[in-house]
Image (tube, rainbow, N blue to C red):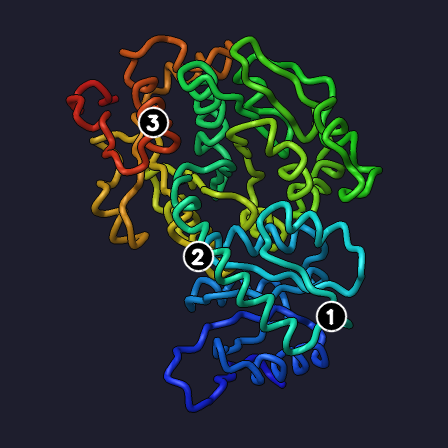
Amino acid sequence: MNDASLEVNTPSEELPVAVLLVEDTEEAAIRIREMLQASTSPLFQVTHVRTIQEALLRATQDPFGLVILDLALPDSHGLVTFTRMQKAVPRVPIVVLTDKDEDTDAESALDQGAQDYLVKSQVDDKSLARSLRKALRRQAATAVVSEGRRTPKVVALCASRAGMGKSLLTSNIATVVAQDLKKNPLVVDLEFGAPAIMLGVKPDHGLIDLLDTPPDQLEEKDFTRCIQMDTKNVSVLVGSPKMEYAKVSRLWNASLLGHLLQKLGETFDPILIDMPILYDEDHLAMLSLVDSILLVFTGLEILTLRETQGFLTAMTQSGVPKERIRLILNRFDQKATLSNKEIGRLFGEEPWATLPNDEKEALQNINAGQPVVLKGVSQPLARAYRDLVRRLFVDPDSPAEWTRIPIGLFGR
């Protein structure tokens, strides 16, 4: 049976609940459809897909009231499957399917917000319908509480090419969060420690030390022993302290990142991930695990804009919700940069934040390991960084403020 929607027709006037069934086994999918067809209260309209990639894409296209999710799929396995789905539909109840009576991943999914989990061999039409009804009721009861958290916990900083300033932005965001908001940020650099250099940190260990251990066997202590803290209370975890290209690329997978976020999520807030420069399938899968994505670019040349547009398209086509992506126009120069409206016409939306062009301050930050934001609140680039942090973590609905400063302060 191909991917399709099956509407259950009954004489009732009740509107059906749209269900996304994510199950790769055809026999199991047919059996679950038949069980749902037997339900009369509520009615169910089922859309069936076989992979997490298909599920993430459908979740961005159609509104679903409930997800039934098998944790073992051809392109994703274990707890990370649930995490990716939950990030895509944070307000939709998820019921997990498993083949085992005692499944630690299914239990962990419950701890992280799944409404229930069912053993495939034991479920029948009554127990399935009962589980789904409870899931819908519980989700409705917690909806108001869930709406309360509007600021992101995990933020990925991305760019379509090197030199866009994302590592500089990462280090300054983390410093403002630690110094001004008194939070406990963690910077995760999946490469060779560029943010660490900009924070004045010289790491001795990195995630590369953990490659010999399967991700699902890693504990919090394994990750924390690779973390170092700078003098500004920013914790840093690098991919590798050495330029080991062949090895560090093995870190770029959703399974390792998913387990890292699971183990360290209670200790650090926020977690800022400086992403590698690529947008293949593994990279896009990692982005499905985060709450917010800052896509950093400059408006100085058409090639950069085209690459950024391509990256943005790749993310949305892979199932990353567009509302989770924030465009950051870096090195804004009134004389040389496209206007926000021109960029808006190109990308379909204007930049969420615009950062001034201050090459001198940026270079001093990089070479001295001292974030720009430590220069004081009056420095224009520092003001722009603080304004971005305020809007991202404190008051998401507030407008940008640095643009009220006369443009002459930024002209170069």
- The label shown at residue 141 is none
Q: Residues within 10 Å of mark 3 (few under 14, many from 20)?
A: some
Quadrant that contains the C terminus: top left
- The label shown at residue 120 is 1
Asked whether residue 331 is in view, the answer is no
- SS of the residue at dot 2? helix
- Image location of residue 337, percent across then percent down: 26, 36
Residue under circle 3? 390
Give the quarter of the image for residue 299: top left
- SS of the residue at dot 3? helix
Q: Earlier in the sequence, mark 2 or mark 3?
A: 2
Tell me the mark number nearer the camera, choosing from 2 and 1. Answer: 2
Residue displayed at 56% across by 12% down:
200
Q: Residues within 10 Å of mark 2 (few under 14, many from 20)?
A: some
Which of the pair 395/34 is nearer the observer?
34
Q: CA distance from mark 2 to mark 3?
A: 30 Å
- Image location of residue 92, percent across then percent down: 48, 58
- Image location of residue 373, percent across then percent down: 39, 15
Kindly identify the amino acid type of the residue bearing the numbered disc 3.
Arg
Residue under circle 2? 140
Q: Earlier in the sequence, mark 3 or mark 1?
A: 1
Q: Is residue 69 above or below residue 286?
A: below
Q: CA distance from mark 3 to mark 1?
A: 46 Å
Which of the pair 310/156 is nearer the observer?
156
Quadrant that contains the N terminus: bottom right
Kindly identify the amino acid type of the residue bearing the numbered disc 1.
Lys
Residue displayed at 30% across by 42% down:
351
- SS of the residue at dot 1? loop
Give the quarter of the image for residue 50: bottom right
Kindly identify the amino acid type of the residue bearing the numbered disc 2.
Ala
